[in-house]
Amino acid sequence: MPSAEPVSALSSSSPLPSDGAAGLSSPAASAAAASASGSTKAPAAVGGWVPIDPAAWKAQVDAYQALSPDPVPAGVGNLAEFRADCQYSHSAADDPIVFPGLPGASHMHSFVGNKATNAGTTPADLTKFTATSCKPTLDHSAYWVPTLYEAGTNQPVETTGFRVYYRTRMNTSTGQLPMPNGLRMIAGDAKKSVPTPRGSQGQFYCAFYGPGDLDGIARSTNGNWPICGGDATLHFMLAFPDCWDGKNLDSPNHKDHVAFGANNTCPKTHPVKIPAITFDIQYGAKGTTEGYYLSSDKQGRSASSMHGDAFVMWDATTMNKRTKNCLLQRRTCDNNGYQQ
C-alpha cells in the first residue's frame, strides 16, 4: 500500500515539509511566501525553483479532507479517473514554462485549454483570463505540444481531439491528494532524436473505436510514421508523473519536482500522490508516404521528440471534488462528474 505520509505531513496538526528533501535544492524560505496555489500573486522563483505557498496548499488540503464525497449513482464504473475534453486553441512559438516572458523563443507549439496562453502567462493570468477550449470550463489550465507538420507540404496538422485524463495509476487510492494550482510539468523529451519504426515505444499510432492495426497498414518512406487504414487516424498518448515533492511548483529542468510512482507508492523524495495526467491526442491525419515532423525536430523527422506541457489551474473546489469523488472513491468520471 502507498504510504499515508502525504496526508499526515499536510494535516492541520503537522507542518508542511521543511526545506531539504533528498536530491532537491530547495529555494530560500523568504521566496516561499509568494505562490500561485489558489492565489493571484505570481510565485517568486529562486534558481529555477518555484515554491508553493505552504499556507495556501494547506488550506486546499484541509478543504479537501473536510469534503464529503457525493453519493455514487447506480451504474457508475470503477475506473479511477476524471477528464477534460479540449479542442485546439492557437499556435505560437511560445513556452511559458521553459521560456517564460520570451515570446518567439521556442519552437512552435499547439495550445489547448486556456485561450490567453502566451510566453508571459503566469498563474495569476490563468485565473484572470479563463476563456478555455476545454470542458469543463472550470479547468483554466493550459496544455500544449509541439506542432505536427506534413513533411511533404510543411503544413501544420492540428489536433482534432485532445483529452486530458486525471487518473490514478496505483491500485489503491490511500493518500490521494488533489492537484496544486500553478503546478508546471513536462512529459517527454524535446531534444530526443531517434527513429520511431513500427513497434517502437514513443511512436504515433493509428486508432479508431474498433479493431485495426495500431502500427498502421503501411509506414512512411523513412519508417517513422504509420499510415492508417479504414477510419483510423493518428493518435499519441503522453503520461505525466503522479508524485510531487510537496514544496515546488516548478524546478530548473521542469521535472525534478515531480516523479513517477512505483509499486503503488510514491518515493520518499516526492511523497505527495497527485492525479496522474495523461494526454490522449487525436489528429485528423491518416498518414502519408512522406511522413511528418515535429517542430521540436524538423531534421530528424521522427516522433521521438514528442513532449507535452501542463500548466495546471482549476477552480480549487472543483479539483477537490473531482479528486475525492473520482480518484479517492475509484469511480469513473467524465467532464461533468460521475459518468453514467
Image (cartoon, rainbow, N blue to C red):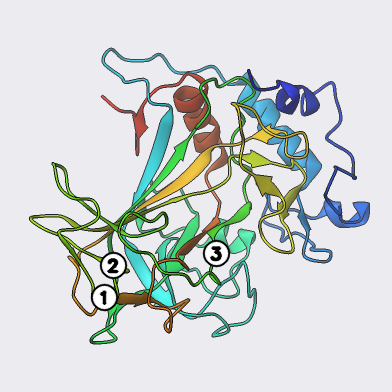
Q: Nearer the viewer, residue 254 or 189?
A: 189
State the residue position of label 1.
291
Q: Position of residue 150 (x, y in %)?
A: 27, 79
Q: CA distance from mark 2 to mark 3?
A: 18 Å
Quadrant in the picture for the C terminus: top left
Q: Amino acid at mark 2?
A: Trp
Q: Nearer the viewer, mark 2 or mark 3?
A: 2
Q: Amino acid at mark 3?
A: Asp
Q: Residue at x 30, y 59 (%)?
A: 198
- For residue 31, side relative to residue 156 (left or right): right
State the residue position of label 3.
189
Q: Amino acid at mark 1?
A: Gly
Q: CA distance from mark 3 to mark 1?
A: 20 Å
* Residue at disc 1, secondary structure: loop
Determine whether 263 is above or below 236 in the image: above
Q: Position of residue 295 (x, y in %)?
A: 43, 78
Q: Residue at x 42, y 82 (%)?
A: 298
Q: Residue at x 11, y 58 (%)?
A: 229
Q: Position of residue 174 (x, y in %)?
A: 61, 19
Q: CA distance from mark 2 to mark 1?
A: 6 Å
Please report contact status of discs 2 and 1: CB closer than 8 Å, yes or no: yes
Determine whether 194 is above or below 183 in the image: below
- When asked about the image quadrant of residue 165, the answer is top left
State the residue position of label 2.
225
* Residue at disc 2, secondary structure: loop
Label 2 or label 1, whichever comes before in sequence order: 2
